[in-house]
Amino acid sequence: MNEGPEKLIKEITEGFSKHGYICSEQISTAVYLASQLEKPILIEGPPGVGKTELANTAALHFNKEMIRLQCYEGLDESKALYEWRYGKQLLYTQILKEQMQEVLEGAKGLKESLARLVDFEDIFFSEDFLETRPLLQALTTEDGAVLLIDEVDKADEEFEALLLEILSEFQISIPELGVKKAVVKPLVMLTSNNSREIGDALKRRCLHLYIPFPDAKLERQIVHARVPEIADSLQKQLVNFVQGIRELDLKKHPAISETIDWAKTLILLNSEELDAKLATDTLNVLLKHQQDIEVVAKEVPRLISDSMGTPDGKSIN
Amino acid sequence: MERVLTDFVKALRNANVRVSPAETIDAMSVINDVGYDDKVLLKRTLSIVLPKTPEEKQKFSECFDNFFTDEIKPVEENQSASDNANPQEGKSDLANTLLEGSQAEIMLAIADAAEESEIREIKYFTQRSVFTRRILEQMGVGKLEDEIMQMGAQNDGGEPSELEQELRNQLTGLRERVSNYVQQQFLLHGDVSGEQLREQVFKSMNMAQIDRSYMQEVHSLVRRMAKKLANMHSRRKKNYRRGKLDIRKTLRDNWKNQGVLFNLSWTYKKVDRPKILVVCDVSGSVGAYARFMLMFMFSLTEVVSKLRAFVFSSNLGEVTQDFKDQSLEPAIEKALQKHGGGSTDYGQALSEFVSLCLDDIDKKTTVVILGDARNNFGPEKSHLMKLIFERAKQVYWLNPEGKYRWNTGDSVMTNYSAYCTKVFQCGSIDQLERVIATLLKTAI
């Protein structure tokens, strides 16, 4: 037991905030643990709370290359792991045909020709002809990398099984070349929107971080970091307004990214204060469903008055 | 200290958080790094390593707070003032332990007494006070109380002596400590939320007899079941019916044949998830079941995307949209209010169902009918059932009544069952689960 962890976690929080990513203690602890235990983090949470951004920032902070693999239905190993450049292989065999002839010249009988060929056997299945895809690339990067496997839940279940070897052993078996081990173990982050339950086997190999919608205090810090030009009073109002909306029963609640967009919108419109008309007019930045807009439009006056009033005093100080 | 962690993991498992040995090892290495001293940091780190879903995190948080209250307290030695008190001869063992013993000795005494009282047997929340009492008695609290009483009697009227005061304090402290200890043991050994027991009972009980105040619990149960089933169900299976020629794969695979295209590879099409239509009887005769049937339907709409739900007593109405927009209680209330309670007319309902969505029934569709087939001696129109049966992939009928009651009175089960792929009796949640499991197995 030393005073190390506390300090290192704090360093991460501060380092991230330098890159404009304000994170809760939960998040920085998770990043710390991931680098300490060399385990992947599975990040879950509603869309727009900064899951992908976390990986981007981690790459900046640790000064490592960011490698991203976007998952989708039908993603398979030839797109995620590696592929043989068969086109190049084909071309090279054509070009090298004459050379082959030279090599084989004077060889008597099949046996001798074969023996000569054996020396050249693996030319076409060497690294020169290997197209590395994100996962393999992450393992072979010299200085280590941050590997983001985005929206794992969108990929098929078979793909999850493919990930297991990489995530627990940090290695990939390529039949022609043998097992490739990581040069430097990459920091792996997986994100999921929970459109499908992730398999237990995968979950067990990961640390689990759930990022919820932020509370008012944190959200204000985030808005401040991302849209520094916004006036304090407007920012306070705006955040309280969004927090109020999240308490309503909606199809999709506005996330941080929407709050930031909205803040930018308001600045663009040169507004200094949030009033009912302005809010109603710009609701479509915050909400992405017509039904939700209708629900919120009715509540706007109340939300406006709430956002000016007392509740913020409690939550901010 | 490892013991503390394994005990905590045990408590977590007891509270329905699944923790694997590998995760325990992770937790161990995390603790080596972070240490036990900072409780907040410890909680934060463990909450990243151990629980793996938001629900589990919730449970973890409660469990952690309960478990570590006592664990950290004994370290504070604020009660060691008792060192000054002179040991008095002629006192009971307990009094001496309390006055002279260290914190560890007292804890040890508690643990011994607890062992004697068979604390491991603790199962239910309500047993905690019994066990607390039992442990205290085992430790000889009765005798100590007598002594204190005597002391009080000896200097009657006057100020209580220092010793008496001290003993009283210690006794209160001891009571608190024992009750904390029991609480912790309960977390380890007991059925923490009583959930397992209640679930068992609910599952095997006839659905009509479950009180409405348990709706919430039953719903979470049904929902979990529906989710499990839907997960199984949503697994797409590859269909090897030939699609287009996969040129890349063919070239790659045939490289070993010197580029001679010997084995052809095809892209394959995936089978779509089957459609489900659920029709639920909510008339008076199945009134007691209707709520649970609707609850199940509701949970299914939550997890299966291509599902249409209908309810009827005499007239049929679609409730898919209501179920999607509203939460459980209001959705069910609305469905019951709009369509429920009337007398059954299967003939009418069937003809409306056919006119409403016969076009929607194709060879991928599964039709599920929930009802008792009691038709009030009205026209049964089983030719419509035949029509549905011929178009759909399969038709299932789930009847909440016991088999012995089918075809008695106004029940026309046989006439309909002729046009069903299968009929099931389905009166309890257990039965429902079994039925749906078989249903999904054959559905794909």
Image (tube, coloured by chain):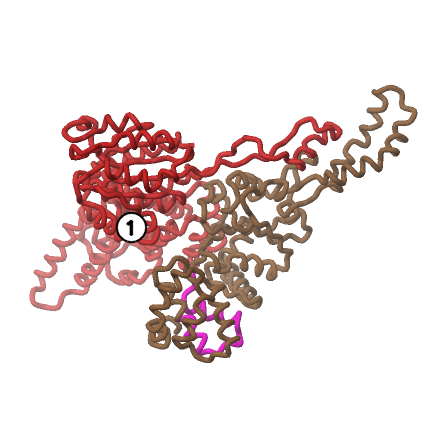
Residue at 34% across, 53% down: B325
Is B269 in front, or is B204?
B269
Percent position of residue A25, x then y: 46, 62
- Check the picture and name the quadrant holding the C terminus of chain B: top left
Front-most of residues B94 and A181: A181
Residue found at x 30% / y 53%: B327
Q: Which residue is mark 1?
A: B328
Residue B369: x and y, percent? 29, 36
> Residue type at mark 1?
Leu
The stretch of residues the image draws in magenta is: A213-240
Q: Which quadrant of the view contains residue B269?
A: top right
Q: Chain of mark 1?
A: B
Give the x, y percent position of residue B307: 37, 43
Q: Tell me if residue A190 comes above or below residue B265 in the rendering.
A: below
B95 and A77: which one is in front? Answer: A77
Label 1: state its secondary structure.
helix
Q: What is the chief secondary structure element of the magenta stretch?
A: helix
Query: Chain A in the picture: what colour?
Result: brown
Q: Which chain is red?
A: B
